[in-house]
Amino acid sequence: MAATVAQTAGSEKNMLLRAELRRSERWGKLRAFALVLPLLLFLVITFVFPIGRMLFNAVHDDTLLTLMPRTTAALAAWDGNDLPGEQVFAALAKDLRDTWEQKTMGSVAVRMNYELPGTGSQFTSSARKASTLLTGPYKAALIQIDPLWERKEVWNFFKRGASPFTAYYLLRSVDYQYGADSQIVATPPETAIFRDAFLRTFGISVGVTAATFLLGFPVAYLLATLSPKSSNLLMILIVLPFWTSMLVRTVAWVVLLQQNGVVNQALVGLHIISHPADLIFTRFATIVAMTQIQLPVTLLPIYSVMKTIPPSHIRAARSLGAGSFYAFWRVYFPQTLPGIAAGCLLTFILCLGYYLTPALVGGPSDQMVGYFIANYTNKQINWGLASALSALLLVATLLLYYVFNKLVDVNRLKIG
Amino acid sequence: MRSSALSKKTLVIIGLVASTFVLTKPGAAADQITITSWGGALQRAESQAWFEPFSKTTGVAVNEDEYSGDAAKIQAMVETKSVTWDVVDGYSTWVNRLCDQGLLERIDWNKLGLNRSKFIDGDMYECGVPSVISSSVVAYDKDKLPDGPKTIADLFDTKKFPGKRGLEKTAAGNLEWALVADGVPVQDVYKVLNTPEGVDRAFKKLDTIKKDVIWWEAGAQPPQLLADGQVVMTAAYNGRIYDANKNSGKNFAIMWDAQLPGVGNVWVIPAGGPHLDDAYKFIAYAASPEVQGTLTKYIPYGPANKDAMEFVGGEVLPWLANAPEHMTNAIKTDTAFWNEKGDDLNQRFTAWLAQ
C-alpha cells in the first residue's frame, strides 16, 4: 500500500516534471522558430510566392472567361460540328458590345492573336461594328461583319476559354498547339523554336560543364599540391575574377573578341589569319565566356576535396608498386569524385539559367531558354508563355537534380 | 521568467524588423512628375529642350527615367497598380494596343488645349499625342567607306559591300527594306507585305544576309557599332547619327534611300499615374508649337505639330527626315499596318531569328 502511494506520488512528480520539460521544450522550439521566422518569411515572400505565382500563370488564363462570359457559357452546349446557333451569336453580340464599351476588346484581341495569329484585329473591328448591332438576328449580321465568325477554330477557341485554366502555354513551349477542332497538333515549322531552344540550352550547359572540368581539374590539383606560398598566389588569381561582376567579365569578352578586338588584332598582326575572324556573336564566344565565368565554381569544390586527401595515400600506392598514373587513377582520382560531382552539378545548373552572357556575346541562334523568357516577358508581353517556359526549365532542372541524386549521393557532395 | 521576458523582447524586435518589409507607398509630393524616355542623345536633347524649361516655367520638378521602348514595364506597373511613370515617350507600334487594353489614359484634347487636327497622325491615337518625326535610315562611316551605299539594295549586297551590317532586332522596318531591295516599289510595300506570299518573300530576302547581320536593340548602339568598325553600315535613327557627328566628331553619313520616316514617338500617360494634371500640363507644354520646334536645336527630329515647323532652325534641315530631297524614295511607315499585324509578324521574326 505504502509502496503504491509512494509510486503514485513518484509518478505524479514524474508527470509534473515531464510537463515542465515539455513546456520548456515547446518554449525553446518557439524561440528557435521565432529566430528563423524572418528568414522563412523572406524566403516565402521573395522565392516561394513568386515561383508559385509563375507556375500558376503558366496554366491559368481567365481572359476569355471574364471578358466574354456569355459567349463562353453559351458555347458549353455546342457540339463542335456545325456553326453555333443564333443563341450563341446573340451572346457574342452582347459580349462584343460590352468589350467595346468597357474598352477591353484589346485584351481579348491579344489573347486571340496568341493562338490564332492575325485574328486579333478582326476581333477588334468586329467589336467596333457590333457596338451598333442592337437587334437580331445576330448570326447573319455578325458573319456579314466579319467572316471570322464562320471559322470553326475561332469557336473552339472560345469554347476552350470557358475554363480559367489552359494548357496552351505549356503546349506552345514544347512546340505544340491546338488545331481547328481543339486537337493537339505540332506548331508549324516557321514558329516552332522552343524544343530546339531547350536542346541548345542543355547542349551548351553540358559543353561548358565539361570545359570547366577539363580546365579546372589540373589547376585544382596544382593548387592542392603546391607549397602554400605559391598556391595562395594562384588562388588569388582564381578567386579575383570570381569576385568580379558577371556583367563586367562578359563585356570584357566583347572587347576581346569583337571584329577589331584584341584577339583579332593579335591574330592578324601575327599573320596567322589575313582577315579578322568572326569571333563575337557566335556559339564559340558564348561557350568561351561562360566557361571563364563558371571555371571557379567547378574548380573550388574539387580543390577543397583534394585538400583533404592525404598525400600519404599516393606514396603508399607507389611504394606498393603502382605506376604514377595507376596510383593517381586508382587511388587519388576516386577520392576527388565527390568534389567533381559537386562542382559540375553547380556549374551545370547555373548554366541552364544563363541569360546575360549569351545575350551579349552570342548570335541570335545561340540564345538559351532564358533569352526567350526575357523576350516574351519584355518584348512580346506574353507572360503566360514566359511562365510556361520558366516552369518547364524549373521542372527540367529539378528532374536532372533528382536523377543526379540517384546516381551520386548528394549528401556526400562537398560544396566547399 | 527572465528568459520569457527576454524572448518577448526578441519577438517585439523581430516584429519591428518584419514590419519594415511591409511595402509602404512613398508619399507623393505635389509638384513633381516622372518622365520616361529613350536615353542617350534623344533624351539629352529632350531634357534641354523640354524638361528643364518646363520645370523653370511651371515649377514642377521633373524626374527622368530611361527605358528601351518596351511596353512591358508599363503593363506591369498598371496591372499591379504601382504606376511611377507619369509621362512616357512611347512608340507608335504599341500605343494603340496598350490603349485598347486600358493601360493608358485616353487623351482629353480639350484639357490639353491643343488642336488635334494640327498633329500628323493625331487622329490615329486615342491615348497618345504625336511628338516628333524620326526615321530609320542606313548609315555608314565616310572615313572608312568613302564610296558608300547608294540604294537599299546595297544593304543586301554582300559582294559589293562585304562585312557585317547592323539591323534593329525587330520586324518593323527590316521587312519593308527586304521587299524594296527585292524590287518592290516603295508605294506598294505595304500592299505586298499584307499578303502571306509577301511576308515569305521578305523573310527570304532577309535570309540572304542573315549570317552577316549584327542585331541591335537600343538606338544608342548603331553609332557605337559604326565607331568600333564592327559593321560597314547599319540601320540607325537619323538623329543619333547627327548627334555622333556633332558631339563625338564622327564623319558618319546617311543614305536616305528607302528611309522609313514616321511619327514614331508618341506621348502617353500610363493609366492611374499619381500626377495626372501635371502630366497633362507637361504634354501641353512639350507639344505646343514653339516648344516642340525647339527640339531641333539639339537633335534633328522634326515636330509632329505642323504649326511647329516655323520654329525649326535652318541648320538641321538637311538632317531632317522630312526634308523634301530625302523624301523622293521614302517608305512612309504605315503605323496602322503595324498595329494590326505587328504581333503576328514579330512572333514570326523572333522564330526566324532563332532558327
Image (cartoon, helix red, strand yellow):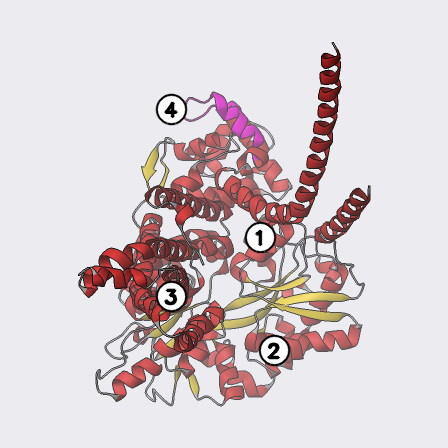
Q: Residue at x 35, y 42 (%)?
A: A403
Q: Could you tell whether B205 is left or right of A243 in the image? A: left
Q: CA distance from mark 2 to mark 4?
A: 61 Å
Q: CA distance from mark 1 to mark 2?
A: 27 Å
Q: CA distance from mark 3 to mark 1?
A: 44 Å
Q: Which residue is mark 1?
A: B98
Q: CA distance from mark 1 to mark 4?
A: 36 Å
Sequence-earlier tag: 1 or 2:
2
Which mark is in front, 1 or 4?
A: 1
Considering depth in this image, is A61 or B149 the residue closer to the camera?
A: A61
Q: Which residue is mark 4?
A: A81
Sequence-earlier tag: 4 or 3:
4
Tags 1 and 4 on a common chain: no
Q: Residue at x 54, y 26 (%)?
A: A73
10 Å crowding of disc 3: few (<14), some (14-19), many (20+): many
Q: Chain of mark 2?
A: B
Q: Which mark is residue A295?
A: 3
| Quarter of the image with the N terminus of chain A in it | top right
Q: Which residue is mark 2?
A: B44
Residue B256, x across and y down, in percent: 42, 78
10 Å crowding of disc 1: few (<14), some (14-19), many (20+): many
